[in-house]
Amino acid sequence: MAVYNPKSLRAEEFINDGEILETLEYAEKNKNNIELIDEILNKARPQKTESGTVCKGLTHREASVLLACDIPEKVEEIYRIAEEIKLSFYGNRIVMFAPLYLSNYCVNGCLYCPYHLKNKHIARKKLTQEEVRQEVIALQDMGHKRLAIEAGEDPVNNPIEYILDCIQTIYSVNHKNGAIRRVNVNIAATTVENYRKLKEAGIGTYILFQETYHKESYLKLHPTGPKHDYDYHTEAMDRAMEGGIDDVGLGVLFGLELYKYEFAGLIMHAEHLEAVHGVGPHTISVPRVKHADDIDPDVFDNSIPDEMFEKIIACIRLAVPYTGMIISTRESEEVRGKVLNLGISQISGASRTSVGGYTEEERPHDSEQFDVSDQRTLDEVVRWLMENGHIPSFCTACYREGRTGDRFMSLCKNGQILNCCHPNALMTLTEYLVDYASEETKKIGFELIGKELTKIPKDKVREIAVQNIEDIKASNRRDF
Ligand code: SAM
């Protein structure tokens, strides 16, 4: 039987089933142990030190105890600390992005995904390079600067060369007000050699959702195709890092398996990356399974209640305080509004989950991956964020200046990211408002920027930000 070892490169040792089961037992046994819970909450709380605010994070066992705890005042405390951590390291900034679906050809048999090979009524599409260009222009016309590309797994229709061509095309489109500045990639697990090629193509984060950490369920949910190989899928981030990719993004498709098991597995995966590579995941995504074509909605449709989903997000925030957290348009405006305060740092806006969807007048459904709950325009999402006190940020400066992987994390840990991120967010928001926003959004935005500028502590930095914002308004651009 495999023994738990976070430093191992073998999936069965770092996502060790025995350790997860023991963790769940430990959490259940201690869910009313007030002394222990208080100790864990104290550990999670941000501490002020001479070098700034720091957080210790939590182990998977500690975090699992909090997730199991139902004592109302302790749960309230978890939410309070999550909010405090969010504000300490990310401030009120929310990074904006959009997914770009390249191809829905897929040879896998994932039971929850309409791209599965046997689905004969979904329209199969793969963008040509000219269509990629048109999609990017449509996304740039909305104001997007950061994309996550998505594709099914199909070595014939979507080989790595196709993905690389698409990335090159995306970066080369410079329509009206500036190019896409960061392309994150969500494609199937692949080889070290292919990860190296993606790195050379200049990708941002490599994102791969584990779907479920529970091996037995994983094998059943992925009955056919290359994705059936649990170990190959689970060890993908190690190969990505070996291939030179600094920033990797984890995620679980919540609703497939028992959430407590998934939660422990996710935090263990983060611990493993930290133990082996010295840097944890750059982001964690929290998708919930949605209704989709050819998928039984009674089996797979947001199978965890909203309150539990919110608690999971808050507990992830406490466990891995320096990791960005992403929420997509799978979630409604209401749910997104709540979880933004509990630790989410990136959201998508105006997403279309169909191949070629951005160039269509009406939202197409024939090649869609899943139903989108939040169907607002980017302008509406940006305005809504600002009305709720958040700063939508289109900044990608860290990535372009090489602040990735452990360099990003150490800046984040020293509180330095906040010092430069806040002014950068305000400058890129100004760009967005000047170039794309409706009059109403502009009005709310410029008022917010005026207020937020006064929060920049260093006089010199504030003066530079004020000057840059004036320059942008006068249409003299720099690249932030
Ligand atoms: N093909 C790649 C792979 O298999 O990892 C990644 C691309 S896939 C388009 C992106 C993600 O969509 C999957 O990892 C899965 O978690 C999610 N997804 C699939 N079906 C879904 C559904 N019905 N509801 C919500 N998310 C879904």
Image (cartoon, helix red, strand yellow):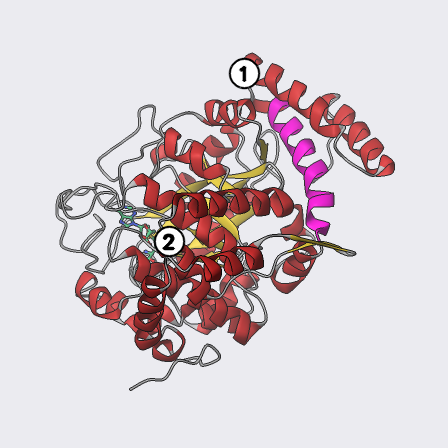
- Report the magenta residues as a range: 415-434
User: Residue 308 at x, y = what percent?
Assistant: 33, 45
Q: Which residue lies furthest to the bottom in this view?
A: 1
Q: Point out the frontmost of discs 2 and 1.
A: 2
Quarter of the image for the C terminus: give it: top right
User: Residue 79 at x, y = what percent?
Assistant: 48, 43
Judge whether residue 329 is colored magenta.
Answer: no
Residue at 31% over, 32% down: 373
Q: Is residue 426 something one can see in this rendering? A: yes
Using the image, determine if residue 32 lies above or below residue 2. Answer: above
Residue at 36% over, 58% down: 31
Judge whether residue 432 is colored magenta.
Answer: yes
Residue at 62% over, 52% down: 46
Look at label 2 and name its amino acid: Cys
Corner quadrant of residue 366 = top left
| Residue that label 1 marks | 438
User: Residue 276 at x, y = what percent?
Assistant: 53, 76
Q: Is residue 233 something one can see in this rendering? A: no
Nearest to N terminus: mark 2 or mark 1: 2
Mark 2 secondary-structure assignment: loop
- Label for residue 415? none
The residue lying toward the viewer, choosing from 262 and 114, is: 262
Q: Is residue 275 left or right of residue 308?
A: right
| Residue that label 2 marks | 69
The residue lying toward the viewer, choosing from 393 and 152, is: 393
Look at label 1 and name its amino acid: Ser
